[in-house]
Structures are given as C-alpha cells and as structure tokens.
Image (spheres, helix red, strand yellow):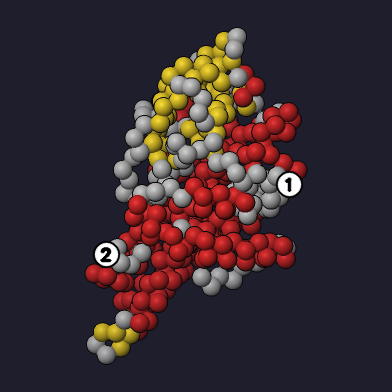
Amino acid sequence: MKVQRILPTEEAADLLGLVREIAAGELAPHVAQFEAAHEFPREIVRTLGQAGLLSLAYPEEYGGGGQPYEVYLQALEEIAYHWFAMAEAVNVHNLACFGTATYGTKAQRAELLPGMLGGELLGAYCLSEPEAGSDAASLTTRAVRQDDGYHITGTKSWVTHAGYADFYNVFTRTGGPGARGLSCLVVPSGTPGMVVHERERKLGVWSSPTAQIGFDDVRVPAERLIGREGKGFLIAMGALDCGRLGIAACAVGIAQAATDYAVRYAKERHQFGQRIISFQGVGFMLADMATQIAAARALTLAAARLKDAGLPYSLEAAKAKLFATDMAMKVTTDAVQVLGGAGYVADHPVERWMREAKLLQIVEGTNQIQRMVISQGLD
C-alpha cells in the first residue's frame, strides 16, 4: 500500500511503520487459516494489545497510547488492509472502553481503565437486541436495582467477541420507556447467569465470533454503573460516533487492499497480446477505484481532526461512514470484476474483501440510518 500521509509528529510516523510491520508479519500470514477454520485468533489479538494497538486513542495516564484520533484511524486502516477481522476487534474494543473513559467517575477510571487499556483484556459492546437494532431507544433488556446491585434480564444480539471478551459494555433499561430510561453497565465475563448462544453463521468475517448473549438475573455491583442512570443512550451514541469513524477507516483499508490486488493482477494478466490494464474498460475502472478511496480517506480524516480539535463531528462521522462503506462495496465488487472468473474463487482474496465490505454498510448504524442522521442535521 503506497499512501502519501501527512502525520502530526515523527512519533506518529514511527507508529504507523510499526503497525505496518506487525500487520504484514503477524497478521497477513494467518488470515486464510483462521478465516477458513472460523476460528478467533485470541492470541494474535493479544499481540496487538501488547504492542499498544488496542488503546491508541486513550489517555496515557490510564495506559493508553495518547494518540490523536487521526493517527489511530490510519493505524486501523493499516490493520484492516491486512486483516479486517483484527481491525474490527480493535474497533469493537475501543467502543467497549468508551463509556468508562468518557463518562466514568475518577474512581472508576482509576480502577477499570488500566486493565481495559493494558492489552491483555478484550471488550465487547452489547447494544442491539433481537427486536431493537437501529431503534436503540426501544431496547427491552432491563436492570433492576436491588440491595446487592443491579439484576439484568434480557437478550443482546450481534455481540462481537461473545464468549471471548473479558468484559461487556451492556446497555439496559433502568427507567421508563424511551432513550432516557437507558443506562450502561460494565459486566465481567463469567458472571453467573450470562449465557453465550450459538455463533451466527455469517456471510463473511468468519474469524470474528458473533452471537447472542442471554442475561438471566445477572447480578452486577452498583459500582459498575457508568455515569448515572439514564445516561446510557448518550453513552451509546457517543461511542457510535467514534465507531463510525473506525468503520470508515476499515472500509478504506479493505478497498485499498482490493485495489492494489486488482492493479497487480491487471498488470500481469495478458489478453489479446497486451496487459488488461491497458484496456480502457479496466484501466478507467481502476482509476475510479483509486480516486474514490482517496476521497473516502480524506473525508474520514477530516472528521477525525474535528474530533481531535474538540469540535462537533457527529454529522461528519456519519458522512464518512456512509461514503467510505458504500465506496468499499463498490470498489471490492469492481475488483472482483477486474479479475473476472478468478475473482469469484477463494484462490484470490478479492471475494473475501467483497463479503467483508457488505458488513460495513450495516454495522454501527446502517447506511440508511446514516442518511437519516445527515438529513436531519442539515440547516
């Protein structure tokens, strides 16, 4: 991947070099094996954690990397370029840490964040339910306050890292109907009453485990309530703003990988006595792919710089997520087309990237939801 980057510091440039080295050496050689086996590479994720890559954007005082979001997103892009499931693991873990880091009390941050950000633990984000996906304010999982803490009952869906995470950020109803009745609790893995259901059989990202989790009168100490009761929806939406930028960066990484592969193939494949890249039908398609990637990258980093400057960025995050993921779907589909029949078989990774790109149009709010967010925010 030859991308000309403008980074804020020499340290950031060195960091991106390290990420690239780890991704090429520790991730890329194992993708095919773990994807084919539908196996989650927990030890490889731990390697990312030990290198500090699970917590780049969080404060150094609690064990994070202290990096601007624009640097974190470019690191995430590099990881996604080599193995999207590992970039998704990083992004989901960052979502799971967001509530404690942003809304936790000083005591909660001091107690929980060093472990969350230290690299050994892995988090999960539990928002969606069987009947509450895009409409998060209607979720029904309930937590009842009793003398010994909160008792959670309900079911969470589409939980990435289900059964592998060390802690779960669980959004649950503690009050009345609607968004104001929601709260956020951090639930340790292995808490009695938590049941991980059978893994979902997905179109792609096979090495990443996704499943429902049932909560049957799961007791959580009151000290694990993040913020105060009724803050859950605000925490969830803030986390999703960050997560949408992460998904946009992943989309750029996947699209760049597919384009680079398609370009190499088009330069090596000969038909009618010449390389197929010399045909306008192929060459112009590749030119459009490269241009769309550059535009998505610029839009994503522009939104990240707003976040780093402390300025409102929710709408820009939605725009970046929408544009970058639609772009990735188009680019990976075109990459398959460039390879022709070869693109449709698993001997080449472009079919995997196309399947992975489809997921990106759905997670962290479908692209239809992004269009609603953007249209409602227009002056």
Mark-to-mark CA distance, 2 and 1? 45 Å
* Residue appearing at x 72%, y 62% in the figure: 11
Q: Residue furthest bottom?
A: 273
The residue tagged 1 is 60
The residue tagged 2 is 345
User: Number of numbered discs present?
Assistant: 2
Residue 307 in sight: no
Which sits in the foreground, 253 or 213? 213
* Residue appearing at x 57%, y 53% in the figure: 47
Local packing at callout 2 (Cα closer than 10 Å; few below 14, some 14-19, many 20+) is some
Q: Amino acid at mark 2?
A: Val
**Could you say which quadrant of the image residue 225 lies in?**
top right
Compared to residue 248, the image places residue 123 above or below, namely above
Q: Are marks 2 and 1 in contact (CB under 8 Å)?
A: no
Q: Does residue 105 appear left or right of residue 211 in this picture?
A: right
Which sits in the foreground, 11 or 337? 11
Could you tell me residue 71's position as x and y percent? 64, 57
Q: Amino acid at mark 1?
A: Glu
